[in-house]
Amino acid sequence: MQIVVTGAAGTLGGKLWPLLETAPWCTGATGIDIRPRPAGSRLASIVADLRDPHDRRWIDLVEAADAVVHFAAVDPAPASSWASATAAIDMTANLLAHAGRSRPCRFVFASSNHAMGGYKDVPIPDDGKLRMATEPRAGTRFFIGNGAHSRGAAYGASKLLGERVVGAMAAASEGRLTGASLRIGYCQRGENRPATLLGSGGGPREAWDSQPEADRRRDLTWFRNMWLSDGDFRRLLAAALTAETGTWPGPAIAVNGVSANTGMAWDLEEARRWIGYAPHDDVWAGLAAAG
């Protein structure tokens, strides 16, 4: 399988790169980013701008790929602007105009838990679970200080719209394109340990610290329950890239991408059933082990 990874020089691209170097189902991969990243024995890297719909540097690679993993974003932060969000949508649409054009292609879209982040502050459905069919509530509310809150609506909406574009293009492709949108959880740079997760959600740490204790604890629990360990991140991506589509409800799916965190609202049954995702880690077990 020849794979293209966008945003290859970013946090998630860096966590995926070692897996592609060793996975038996990956025959080669090329990373695309606005800055280069080190290559490997079977991994290459190019510099290109996905916002340019005429840039053959990336178009030729995508048209020849068996799979595309799309991480790239202008500002991949929950508090990013509408300008960043619209640029991200442009990149997704540009890629989908070429993926699967000349050969079957699996398009793995890095969506986000923020596509459903509004449920942090409103009642979750009666069964207590967030699934593909749950009514979306894009953007997560976070405290910014002086009694004020903000909501990452632009970032969450760009992810939700990306999921829908993946679905529409897969449906129109006559079987050439299949799409797996992964609502990726809280995956920190570096070691990504449970003990270093924050409850600020995108706002300043100092503002979160200044909230009443009950609000701080509630927010911290919400964000801890979204944790995705590095090991489970790699298991999730491997499953999304290699899954057969026989059990899928359509040519494109959206599934939650978090670890097996005890008591969370994020349903993992669909990810287990549709792509065979089998997470190993639990944020609460990790916190207990760390003392």
Image (cartoon, rainbow, N blue to C red):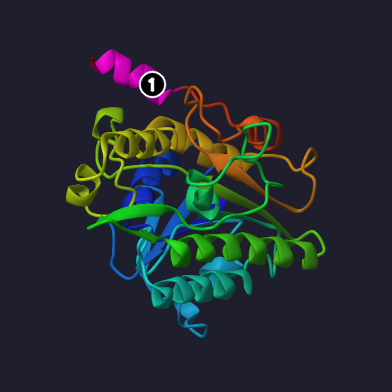
Please identify the dominant SS of the magenta region.
Answer: helix
- Residue 183 image position (x, y, % from top left): 53, 47
- Residue 22 image position (x, y, % from top left): 43, 37
Q: Residue at x 27, y 56 (%)?
A: 147
Residue toward you, 45 or 193: 193
Q: Residue at x 52, y 37 (%)?
A: 236
Mark 1 = which residue?
A: 284
Describe residue 94's horizontal placement relative to residue 35 as left or right.
right
Residue 19: quadrant of the picture:
top left
Residue toward you, 5 or 10: 10
- Residue 215 image position (x, y, % from top left): 33, 39
Q: Is residue 289 above or below residue 75?
A: above
Q: Amino acid at mark 1?
A: Trp
Q: Is residue 214 above or below residue 38?
A: above
Part of the protein shown in magenta:
281-290
Q: Residue at x 47, y 64 (%)?
A: 153
- Residue 230 image position (x, y, % from top left): 37, 35
Describe residue 278's horizontal placement relative to residue 164 as left or right.
left
The question of residue 282 being in magenta is answered with: yes
Query: Can residue 24 be seen by looking at this rendering?
Result: no
Helix, strand or loop at mark 1: helix
The question of residue 289 being in magenta is answered with: yes
Residue 164: quadrant of the picture:
bottom right
Query: Can residue 37 be seen by looking at this rendering?
Result: yes
